[in-house]
Image (cartoon, helix red, strand yellow):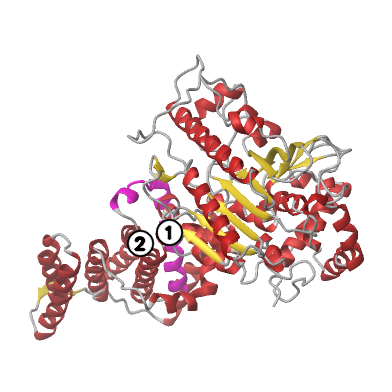
Amino acid sequence: MKFGFQCNRKVLILTGVYFAAALVMFLLTHYPPAYLFLCPLGYFVINGITLNVRPRWKWVTWMWTALYFGAGPVFSTLCIQHIILEPELYRKTKENILKLNMLCVLCIYLLLLAVIAEARFAWWIAHVFCLFIAFVDYFVYEFRENEVSFADISSVGTGLSVMKSYRLQLHDRGAIALLLSALLMAVIRRSRIETKRLVRWIIRAAAAVALIAMVMYLRGRTARMVTQTWEKKGTYKNGFVLNFVLGVGDGIVKAPEGYDLSEIEALEAEYGNAADAADAADQTGAVASNTVTGVSSDTSLLMKTKAPTVLNGRKPVIITIMDESFADFRNVGNLTTNIEVLPFLDTLTENTMRGLALASVYGAKTPNSEWEYLTGNSMAFLPEGSVVYEQYITKTPTSLVSTLKNEGYTAVAMHPYQNTGWKRNTVYPKLGFDEMYFLEDGYFDETKILRKYITDQELFDKIIERYEQQQTQDPDTPLFIMSITMQNHGGYKEKYDNFTNDVIYQTPSGFYEDANQYLSLTHETDKALENLIGYFEAQDVPVEIIFFGDHLPSLQSAFFRSLNGKGISGLTLTQLQQLFSVPFFIWTNYDTEETSVELTSINYLSTLALSRAGIELPPYNRFLADLMTHIPAMNARAFYSVSSGKFLHYDKAAGEEKEWIDRYDELQYNEMFDKSGKSSVFFPYLKE
């Protein structure tokens, strides 16, 4: 081998261009000044060095090629993570997660090597691609505060058109990644091996075999991992590349076994007949008995009595409140506190259906509960870890919103937080909401906060305000309000000057500050509910209020252990479902039957709400009403089997229960994924 150095015009021009680019990026991003001098100096040295390798030293060149090719995925992965994540979030990424991401990126390198059979070009293309997707994810997050996912591919055109109105700003981490990438690409540009045709085919074959082996290994290692979709959680929890790959799996939802449009047509004939619809309308309304055991084999939760006659054909105002992390831990175990946590809610019985409903999520992923309520669909038939608002919302989703709008309602959505959370700013228009109010709109008084979130009382005051506006300006048009609270959102360990814990959990096993804060927050919700119900109780206009929690809060496991003796692990299926059971009630200011429900599930609540409102059930809700009598409660984890008298996993379903679950699965697939065969009977969307 023979080293040399040359400082010719080409080297000077290349270095000058590199320095100019580095200077521009420095002025834009103010990255550490040392990079401005050291990187151009390194670039000058790299381009000036000459190296002649004699034939007998050719093995050194091969070793160098293997070294830089193997190091490429490591460098690319680190660039991706640093470009997307701020330093504090980057430090949260676990080492084993970084290694899995490096292997995913290695698959990209191997794929290109199998196609090109030239290590240099494969390296360049793979690394440039990695830089591209990192910057795309970063810039997309900047203007919508959600990361790129596989589901975004279908709307890339819309995204590009919207992006034109935003200014894309490079940051210091991105500038450093570009400078270092250019340095390494300069090194690799100087590394070339002449290979014969046979050798190139051997390289292709070896790369293909390695790729297949790597894919199989990654499938096994990531089998239990789920996609993370909340803000940048995907990138620091799973790593961007791995999280994106997991999203690809989520995006491919296979048709149910034996799925056939003829089955859908048979269900259309059963539930779409106008005469049957009239019969069903006569059967809707209050429940037949004063106490309904939602998991009983001899009672039906719905459909056996007349609609509320007191309405006289009037359509009530319908208000839904999905309360963040609202739970009643008395369902989990023995909860003893210094004062009553929910004194008002405990006494709310008149004109009220109340009880527990199964949610499909625990501690997070609020929109899945929202989606189950609005659509009547279930997370049971979707990949674990998926978020419907992020991945599966179609352009014309049939829901409670479209049902009520077809009945003449004005549909209003309220959420006192960022509009980009879970893509609500793009999902709500598709659902058909006429009005949307978020934190950014200035609609909520931001001085009315507990801890750092808008209070439930402030949201409820805005509900009343919008109701009064409707009664003043357009009293003949019925109103539907869908509201999602923020007051009780997770993060219960910090102390705040504007909030003190009034509720103290009394137990000899320890002191649980997070539980005390959480219980004190729900105590405030109880006060706000008393004010809200008190207001509408005095109104002459018929009003229905549906209230439910989206999921249980994530608290320290020792707190759960003090309640049930086990914590959150080692539980039976029945005990585990207690951690997915949230309180709900449906209250009216007109006469309806007082009803206690042992257990139902969130996907049934909108059907119950329509019934209590005296609104004729559409075909899909009539199907859900029948399903309810056979499968009284279900979530993503399991269903309650009336025949067995216990919860079962779905693969244990048999007989008539399996038939009903299969029908449900087929109808949901038809609505969400069968673009050509979607039933207009069950899923009509909005009338023209």
> Is 128 drawn above or below residue 593 in the view shown?
below
Image quadrant of residue 664?
Answer: bottom right
- The residue tagged 1 is 240
On the image, numbered disc 2 is attached to which residue? Answer: 80
Residue 149 visible within the image: yes
| Cβ atoms at labels 2 and 1 below 8 Å apart | yes
Q: Amino acid at mark 2?
A: Ile
- Residue 451 vs 240, above or below: the answer is above
Which disc number belongs to residue 257? none
User: Which image quadrant: the C terminus?
Assistant: bottom right
Task: Indicate left or right for 174 with 528 as reference.
Answer: left
Classify the position of the N terminus by image quarter. bottom left
Closer to the chain start, of discs 2 and 1, is 2
Instruction: Kindly give the residue lying farthest to the top in the view shown.
Output: 508
Q: Mark 1 is on which residue type?
A: Phe
Q: Which residues are magenta?
A: 87-114
| Residue 361, quarter of picture | top right
Q: Per the image, is 102 magenta?
A: yes
| Callout 1: SS | helix
**Residue 481, position as x, y percentages in the image:** 60, 56
Badge 2 crowding class, 10 Å Cα cut-off, few under 14, some 14 to 19, many 20 or more, is many
Q: Position of residue 555 (x, y in %)?
A: 49, 33
For the point 50% across and 71% down, the residue is 205
Compare residues 492 and 240 and report the one nearer the observer. Answer: 492
Magenta: predominant secondary structure element?
helix
